Image (spheres, rainbow, N blue to C red):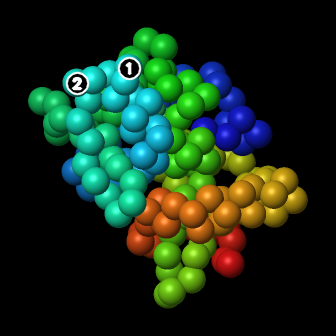
Amino acid sequence: MLKNILTGNECAACRICCVFDKYDLWETPVISRQLKETIQEKYPQQQFIKKDEGYLLRMSEDENGLYYCPMLDKEKGCVLADGKPFDCSIWPYRIMSLGGRRVISIASVCPSLYDKPLSELVNELVKNGLAEKILGYAAKNPGIIKEYQKGYPVLFVE
Ligand code: SF4
């Protein structure tokens, strides 16, 4: 989550981005080999799914059909703290592929965004250099680029 856009309190009260259902499992964070190894050392029971050159955390479905990220401590939040996956560190932004171009969109499921001015969300990308950072990371880690999903407003086109 981006501290310029969301506060720790907002995220602590929500955590929608750390819980998935069968329709948004595509949203689970793609992690690097290095982070996979760090997690494996600390949580040897954790399993992974290979995705392109990266990995996904294997998650189990609960009795309500939800998949909680195994790195989520329901009391304390993400156990990876500042070492969380890049995908999570840029939430609520998403890099996607649309018509052969890379675009940056925003996750419309994030309730804290509903009353944020669009200019604030775009400024974070353009004036604060976040778009450049995301595109640079994605160039080295293309597995984080997700197929465009309907309903995700596009804020930046490469
Ligand atoms: S790695 Fe951390 S921030 Fe990312 S989905 Fe899992 S619990 Fe949430």
Residue at image point 67% right, 63% down: 136
Q: Position of residue 15 (x, y in %)?
A: 46, 31
Q: Position of residue 14 (x, y in %)?
A: 49, 29
At label 2, counting other C-alpha atoms closer than 10 Å, the crowd grade (few under 14, some 14-19, many 20 or more) is few
| Image disc number at residue 42 | 1
Label 2 secondary element: loop
Residue 156 horizontal side relative to residue 43, left or right = right
Residue at the farthest bottom position: 99
Residue at the farthest left position: 63
Residue at image point 46% right, 38% down: 35
Report the residue marked by disc 2. 45
Please name the amino acid that badge 2 sits on: Gln
Residue 47 horizontal side relative to residue 138, left or right = left
- Relative to 34, say whether 44 is above or below: above
Residue at image point 67% right, 40% down: 2
Residue at the farthest right position: 127
Residue at the farthest top position: 75
Mark 1: C-beta under 8 Å from nearest atom of ligand 1:
no
CA separation in Å, label 1 and label 2 = 9 Å
Residue at image point 69% right, 71% down: 156
Residue 68 seen in the figure: yes
